[in-house]
Amino acid sequence: LFIHPFAVFSLSFLLSFSSAFGITVLSKKLVNLVEKKFELNKASHFIVETTSVSVSAYIATLPVVIFYFGSTSTYAVFSNILIAPVSNLIMIFSMMGVILNVIPYVGRLILTIADLLADYFIYVVNLADKLPLNTIQVRYGKLLSFLIIAMLSAIYIIKAKPYLILKKKR
């Protein structure tokens, strides 16, 4: 941002920042909310944590997506739950495959696994795209985006009380 300060207005920055902000602020709170309602074992806790990251990112990026595209995906959270763990594995196997490509057949085998995982990733994305009602068109998207941002900001200010940091101790 020091080199390109106008990058603040780019779509990629807004999506990245809002996603990271949402995950940082909302994810753990969503997990805690579910933990208060249900007793979780390790497997269900992992699922809840993965889901909370996806939901947090979706909630935080929703105003930006609606503002720029005028629509949102109905199945984004569900498809992200299916592909988020796989995307990490794709990166890991791809890096391992490139590094181990100097050993005959080993690198190729690992890259084949990465390729199969990528095929699954693409399959899930294409499947979600073909489902009925896969997008919601939003009328007055810019106004709705502003209202969502205002509401989320108000909730954050009320709950987190960041203004107390500025208050002097007596």
Image (cartoon, helix red, strand yellow):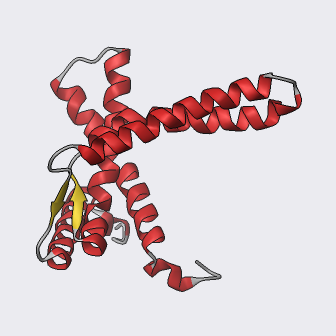
Looking at the picture, how far across and down is residue 155, in whole percent?
Answer: 19, 61
Which picture quadrant has residue 61?
bottom left
Q: In front: 137, or 23?
A: 137
State the count of labels: 0
Query: Can residue 53 be seen here?
Result: no
Looking at the picture, how far across and down is residue 90, in whole percent?
Answer: 58, 36
Answer left or right for 51 relative to 7: left
Q: Residue, x 51% and y 38% (percent of image)?
A: 87
Q: In front: 137, or 26?
A: 137
Answer left or right for 100 relative to 149: right
Q: In front: 33, or 52?
A: 52
Which picture quadrant has residue 127?
top left
Looking at the picture, how far across and down is residue 107, in whole percent?
Answer: 77, 28
Q: Residue, x 39% and y 57% (percent of image)?
A: 19
Is the residue 131 above or below the residue 137 in the image?
A: above
Answer left or right for 118 relative to 99: left
Is the residue 15 above or below the residue 25 in the image?
A: below
Answer left or right for 164 relative to 152: right
Query: Can residue 66 be seen here?
Result: yes
Q: Spot the residue most to the bottom.
A: 6
Q: Residue, x 23% and y 69% (percent of image)?
A: 149
Q: In front: 151, or 71?
A: 71
Is the residue 16 above or below the residue 31 in the image?
A: below
